[in-house]
Image: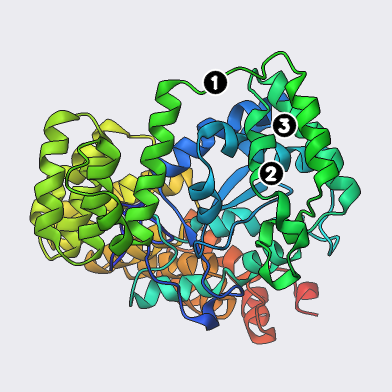
Amino acid sequence: MVAPARSLPRIALAVTVTASLLVQPVAAAAQEVPGEFLIRDTEIEDILRADATPLFKAAGLDASHIQIVIVGSRPDDINAAAAPGAMMVNTALILQTKNPNELQGVMAHEVGHLAGGHSARSGDMTRAGMVPFILTMGLGILAAVAKAGDAAAGLMGSAQYFSALGMIGYSREQEGRADQAGATILEKAGLSGRGLAEFFNNFRYQEVFSQYRRYKYFIDHPLSSDRIDSLQARVAAQPHFNQVDTPEQLALHEVMKAKLEGFLEPQVAIVKFSETDRSYPARYARAIAYYQMKEPDKALRIIDPLLQEQPNNPYLYELKGQILFEYGRAKEAEAPQRKSVELKPEAPLLHINLAQTLVALDDKAKVAEGIIELKKAIAVESDNADAWRVLAEAYDKEHEDGLARLATAEYQFAIGDLKQARVFAMRARDRLDRNSPEWRRATDIVLVSKPSRDDLKDLASEGSISRNQVN
């Protein structure tokens, strides 16, 4: 986790840092939906991606072009939604599913909406930068780190996401079509449709509740007994109806739920996952819960034996490193964070996590290495706000004023503060070699950040743009 405060090991929940679920909602001013926040976590994202990829492929969709956005939510805020290029899943929905097949069933229904091109109520859900912008917001599992000003500022830009999520809604006709499409997609993927029918059946009586008592998912996705009965009949007749989840899939599902519970409801998790429960998910959840409850030593006493049992688990090293870093033990955090990157080098959030620690050590060689790690992350997630923020700090320590200002401009641009992005990009241009790639990038940021007339005049006078563009 790269976040300055707590983060799931970058469940790091994120939105902040790759390592920890932020456990507190960000201030209301920073978001459209009270109690919700965005989450980034490499482990959970990988599990969800593994569940969803066969569904995307079965529907003829390019999985690499669809982002899965995790929304931290209240326990009673069950919801999921789909929009062009994105599928959003609330943590409450994940925790409500009993097994991977139920979660895949709900996902298949949403993929049915995507494949069917069902429009959002607003008719405008295709805004090009929405998904990448959202996914950049934090390194870890939470959407903003507790009391972390930079992370909170980052969330300010997520209002667009929450607004979009609020607009998604489908007609009863489209719901029926998505049911049938979902059943077809599951069958084509070689999966049972049982979970889809059972999940809906669990909430059969939502329709009789008043609007304010219904779960959000069933407000946007109207449910009826006829729909459920029709769906049950359809999936029961399919060849793969009796297909079951593998032991590996079931284990990963339980790990994902335990991790979320440990981060989001640590007090509840400590009771639910008692000391007598020696299963891996239970011990994992307790370690995370103690970490969230500011008892790092208790958390580490659980994590170390787990690492002895699973010496190649990158997420345990990530968690250990995050705890050590957040509790002022950066030198000790370096080793486990290095190990997490070594075990999972393709994960940008882990590189950011390591880089944050290296930059914090105030060692010239470590700072230089941290810059390399950040560039690796940015190569994969070019709009990751946290990566740019830490990179600005690193360049500042190296007295690279122009690059530090450019990184700050990139950070401000990523969080949606175009005014500050423009200001820092203009300052960067003053300190960068003219016509260098960095100088041109700073110029590009100015041009797409609502430049003032004076800015445009300056650019025209130096020949960066034509004088006609000023008018």
Residue type at mark 1: give it.
Val
- Local crowd size for mark 1, using a 10 Å CA cut-off: few (<14), some (14–19), many (≥20): some
Residue 313 shown left or right of residue 142 in the figure:
left
Disc 1 versus disc 3: distance between alpha carbons? 24 Å
Disc with the residue nearer the chain's start (3 vs 2): 3
Say which element carries label 2. helix
Q: Which mark is residue 244?
A: 1
Q: Nearer the viewer, residue 441 or 461?
A: 441
Q: Which mark is residue 200?
A: 2
Q: Quadrant of the N terminus?
A: bottom left
Question: At 63% from the left edge and 56% from the top edge, which residue is drawn?
Answer: 79
Q: How many marks?
A: 3
Say which element carries label 3. loop
Q: Which mark is residue 169?
A: none
Which residue in the rendered view is the most extreme toward the top?
Answer: 239
Residue type at mark 2: give it.
Phe
Q: Which mark is residue 61?
A: 3
Residue 76 occupies quadrant? bottom right
Disc with the residue nearer the chain's start (1 vs 2): 2
Say which element carries label 1. loop
Disc 1 versus disc 2: distance between alpha carbons? 18 Å
Q: Nearer the viewer, residue 307 or 235?
A: 235
Q: Quadrant of the C terminus?
A: bottom right
Q: Nearer the viewer, residue 115 or 422?
A: 115
